[in-house]
Amino acid sequence: MKKAYRAALLRFDPEGRALYDEDGLLVVGPDTEGRQRVIDAGSHAAVAPHHVDVAVTDLPGRILAPGFIDMHIHFPQTDIIGAPSEGLLPWLENYTFPAESRFADPAHSAEVAEVFFDELMRNGVTTSLTFATSHPASVTAFFESAQKRQLRMITGKVLQDRHSPDGVRDNTEQSLVDTETLIRRWHNVDRLGYAITPRFAPTSTDAQLQGAGELAAKYSDTWIHSHVAENKDEVAWARELFPQARSYLDVYTGFGLMRERAVYAHCIHFDDADRQLMRETKTASAVSPTSNLFLGSGFFDFEGADRVDYRYGLASDVGGGTSFSPFATMLAAYYVGREGQTKPGVSIAPSQLWWRHTGGAARALGLEGVVGNLQPGCEADFVVIDPKATPLLARKTALATNLEELLFAMIVLGDDRLIERAVISQALPN
Ligand code: GUN
Ligand code: ZN
C-alpha cells in the first residue's frame, strides 16, 4: 500500500544540487518485490493531486531527507572511539588489534553489531561500507543483524596475513577461501553486499593481495575496501615494502584492486598522478576528516580531488573517527576544506557537504538511484529531522534566510538529537 508524508523535503538533482520544498510531499510504495520505494516527491501542491487516495502522515515542522551513507566505518571499533595515540601505527598496535581480537567470539561480535546498528540508526545513517575484523564470525554477526533490520549494508572479512599480531593475523589460503565462502553466502542477499577487504597493503602478503584481486575480478559487482596514504609513517612503510610501485596507491593497481566499487579510506598523501589513477579506474575515496584530525594524519585535498574530478564521499572512520554523527563529519570536512584551500573564501558549501554524505556517497559506491536520495525509484530510506531539537537549534534554524544557512545551522550545531527517526525501506508482502 502507498503512503505519503507531508513535511519539508530535501532531495538532490543529478548534478548534486539540493532541491528543497518547504511544504513537500513524499509518496512511497512497494515495488514488484514488495520493497518500499519513492514513487513521487516534490512540493505538496504539485504532487498531492496525483495521489488523492493515499493516506498522508503530517509531520509539521519536520524535514525529510535521504538517510546518510557512511562510506567507511569499522563496526568492531565502536568501543575504541577516543583512544589517544601519537598516530596511526601505535594506535593500531595498542588499541585496535587488541580490541579486534575479541571478535573471534561470535557472541561478542553479535553484541557489538547490535550496539553498532542502534548507534547508526540514532544518527540517521542507513547505509555504510563497513570494516569487520579478520574473523568470519564478525561478518556473519554483522550481516545477520543487518538482514533482520532490513538494512542496505556492506561489509567483508578483513584480510591481514602479515605484520599483524596473533589474534588478528589470518592465514593466506584460508583467508581467501573464507572470503569466497562469505561472498557466496551473503553478497546480494536481500539488501546486503560484500566488500573484499585487505586491511591495507603493509599487512598483506603479495599472495593475499593477488588472491583478493582475483576474487574482485571473479565477483565483479562486489566492493573492494581498504586504506591508503593516511599517515606519513604508513606511506614510508608501504614504499619500503613495495619498492617497485610508483606510489603507495599504485601497489593496489598492480594487484587488480582498483575498479568501480573500489573504495579507499583517507587518500591524503597523494599526488596528481594518484588522483588521475583514481579517476581513470573509477575508484573512490572515503574522506574521513574527524579521524584525520584525531590521529593527526593530515588534510584531505578537496581542491585536488575536484580539480582531477574523481569520486569521493564522506565517512566517519569510527573508531579512528570521533563520532557516528554525519553532522560531526560534515563540520570537520568544512574545517579541512578551509585548511587546504589555496583561494580565499568560504569552504565547501553546506549543500555539497550534505550531498557528499548522501547522494554523492551513493554515486561513489555505485549505488546511485538506489539509496542516498529521495527521487522516484530510490529505496525509501530516510530521516525525519526535527530542526528545533535543541533550544539553540530552534533559534538558529528559525533565523535561516535560505537553504544553505538552514543546512549549515544543522551541520554546525547538530548531533543525534536532530534525528527524530530513521525510516528504513521495508519489504512487505504485496
Ligand atoms: N589502516 C589500517 N588499519 C586501519 C584502521 O583500522 N583504521 C585506520 N584509520 N587506518 C587503518
Ligand atoms: Zn579505517
Image (cartoon, rainbow, N blue to C red):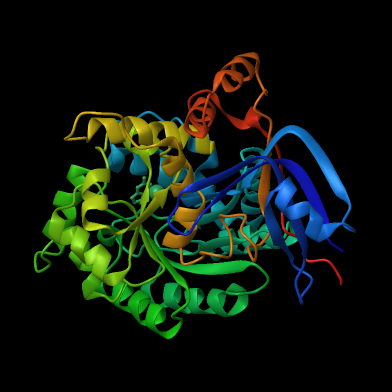
Q: Is residue 224 left or right of residue 60?
A: left
Q: Residue at x 25, y 51 (%)?
A: 305
Q: Is residue 415 left or right of residue 308?
A: right
Q: Residue at x 64, y 57 (%)?
A: 106
Q: Residue at x 54, y 54 (%)?
A: 128
Q: Nearer the viewer, residue 360 or 168?
A: 360
Viewport quadrant of the C terminus = bottom right
Question: Residue 154 is drawn in which quadrant?
Answer: bottom right
Q: Is residue 225 above or below residue 215?
A: above
- Count of labels in the image: 0
| Coordinates of residue 385 in the picture (x, y in percent) | 67, 35
| Coordinates of residue 276 in the picture (x, y in percent) | 19, 63
Q: Is residue 271 above or below residue 65?
A: below
Viewport quadrant of the N terminus = bottom right
Q: Is residue 198 visible?
A: no
| Coordinates of residue 242 in the picture (x, y in percent) | 14, 64
Q: Nearer the viewer, residue 396 or 391?
A: 396
Q: Is residue 314 left or right of residue 39?
A: left
Q: Is residue 26 above or below residue 410?
A: below
| Coordinates of residue 161 in the picture (x, y in percent) | 34, 65
Q: Nearer the viewer, residue 29 or 17?
A: 17
Q: Nearer the viewer, residue 427 or 309?
A: 309
